[in-house]
Image (spheres, rainbow, N blue to C red):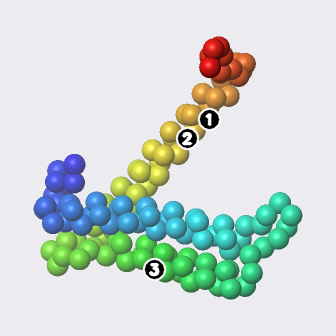
Amino acid sequence: MLSLSGAGNQEAVESTTAAGVASLCIMYMLLFSVILFGRTPGGARPGWGIRLGALAAFLVALVSLVFQIVPLSQGADPARFAMKVGGATLCTYGLGAYLYWRGTRRLTLRPSTPPIRAASRGGC
């Protein structure tokens, strides 16, 4: 699909790899933001050492996300490359959000069924 948009082999590999790494960066940023801003039901928070480590990891993931939109090859147009990486990442997360929404919608529309009980294996 990327080859249809005028990308060569190297740029197509770079953009798909960058989109994958950008997705990982976003997931790690979400993970570390839970440590930074989340609370337990009792209201306890992690210690300062853990939060400082989570902040450092969050910033590393953020910087890595920014660097994913910069092409490595000299021939690639930076703006076009950034649009490809950003578009692929947004499409991936959009598809995931749609599948999650569809699954939760199916669960709410399905009539509740009684739990399945294990069959007895008499004689053992």
Crowd class of label 2 (few under 14; some 14 to 19; many from 20; radius 10 Å) = few
Q: Name the residue under label 2.
A: 100
Please count the marks in the image: 3
If you read the primary sequence from the N terminus, does the residue marked by circle 1 or circle 3 appear first? 3
The reply to whether the C-beta atoms of the residues labelled 2 and 1 are less than 8 Å apart is yes
Q: Can residue 83 be seen in this view?
A: no
Q: Which mark is residue 104?
A: 1
The amino acid type found where label 3 is placed reads: Val
Going by the picture, which residue comes out furthest to the top?
122
Going by the picture, which residue comes out furthest to the front?
123
| In the foreground, 64 or 44 | 44
Q: Quadrant of the C terminus?
A: top right
Q: Residue 74 carries which label?
A: none
Q: What element carries label 3?
A: helix
Counting from the top left corner in percent of width and height, residue 48 is at 72, 85
Counting from the top left corner in percent of width and height, residue 120 is at 66, 16
Counting from the top left corner in percent of width and height, residue 72 is at 23, 77
Please indicate whether residue 56 sits to the left or right of residue 38 in the image: left
Q: What element carries label 1?
A: helix
Q: Name the residue under label 3.
A: 63
The amino acid type found where label 1 is placed reads: Thr
If you read the primary sequence from the N terminus, does the residue marked by circle 3 or circle 2 appear first? 3
Counting from the top left corner in percent of width and height, residue 88 is at 36, 55
The amino acid type found where label 2 is placed reads: Tyr
Quarter of the image for residue 109 reads top right
